Amino acid sequence: MSMILAAAALWGLLGLFAVTLNAAGFDGQQVAILRILCAALLLAVGARWLLRGVDLRVLAAQSPRLVVHGLIGVLGYNLCYFQAIDKVGVGVAVVLLYTAPLWALVFAVLFDGESVTVRGVAAALGALCGVVVLLGQTLSTGTGALSGVLFGLAAGLCYALYPVLGRGLIARLGPDPVMASGFILSALILILLPVTWQALGGVAVHRGEWAIWGALLAMGLLGTLLAYALFTRGLRRVNASRAAVLATVEPVVAVLGAVLCLGERFSPTQWGGVVLILISALLVAIPGRHRVSGSSPADPSPDRPLPRG
């Protein structure tokens, strides 16, 4: 249980590392790019260990699906999430990210034949009300807030698509190779784009500032590799449903960090929206009596935790 909690707490700290980079002049897009590059570099170093036991012929055959999975579940998620942090702050961004379990519930109904339940409807309505409350308060700060809210919701959508797109991949290759390939393939694509070199140029400008290097290393090592390793190993000791509930520590840590360390403030109405969304996420995460017909242990469902990209 402690491993799951530690992983969720490390993910919750990602926003604090991102704000350090924002303050140095990096926008949300550049922060996402730098996180992916740092994580990909570290993963490439350990690729031989991560790919042990993987049939390289199967890996090559699955490469088109791995590219799509990486583009949406890793690249899309990171770009949207860190853009949201840049525009509306850590607290609002992470709460909007936690609409992901509701997106997962929708996908389960549409694609897996999951029956609509009272709990599912209540969770969906609760999350919708929470988003509307947050949206109404946040939009009053300007037009940038609208794009920030949309980026936050898109991050939740990409986050929920990670296990959907990776369904067969994880079953064939295992979670570690799928996660590693997502970051490495995304990094290879990003290297071809001018914006990536602009971000790297910004790092070169700040090469003597240890706070920048510390934030980059923390995002790649602590907020990605260590968090993922703790989470996947924690799943060996804690069932998936309980892990999904424990993982909701992430937005709590992120919101508290934003309030205590960054001075972000929520109005009473916004706190109400935060609570509604978190309760809705818990409703989806806590196991019910239903099951998706024909699902296997490798299949993602609303009762299983979402892997992080």
Image: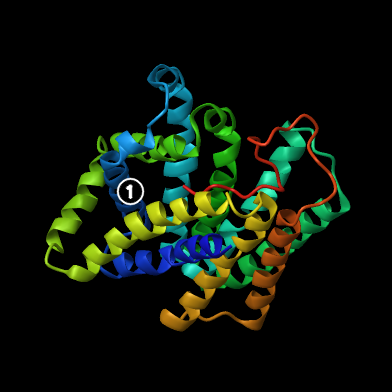
- Does 276 sit above or below residue 231? below
Residue 276 at x, y = what percent?
Answer: 71, 68
Residue at 45% in and 29% down: 66
Q: Quadrant of residue 301?
A: top right
Residue at 33% in and 54% down: 220
Q: Quadrant of residue 272?
A: bottom right
Q: How many marks?
A: 1
Secondary structure of the residue carrying tag 1 is helix
Residue 230 at x, y = what percent?
Answer: 47, 55
Q: Within 10 Å of the Cα at label 1, are there few (<14), some (14-19), or many (20+) other Cα atoms?
A: many
Residue at 46% in and 22% down: 62
Mark 1 belongs to which amino acid? Ala
Going by the image, does 300 lie left or right of 17?
Answer: right
Q: Nearer the viewer, residue 19 or 230?
A: 230
Whether residue 212 is visible here, answered yes or no, is yes
- Does 52 sit above or below residue 33? above
Residue 75 at x, y = what percent?
Answer: 42, 42
Please give the residue where the numbered disc 1 appears in the rendered image: 39
Residue found farthest to the right: 118
Residue at 42% in and 21% down: 55
Going by the image, does 265 lie left or right of 128?
Answer: left
Quadrant (top left/top right/bottom left/bottom right) for the N terminus: bottom right
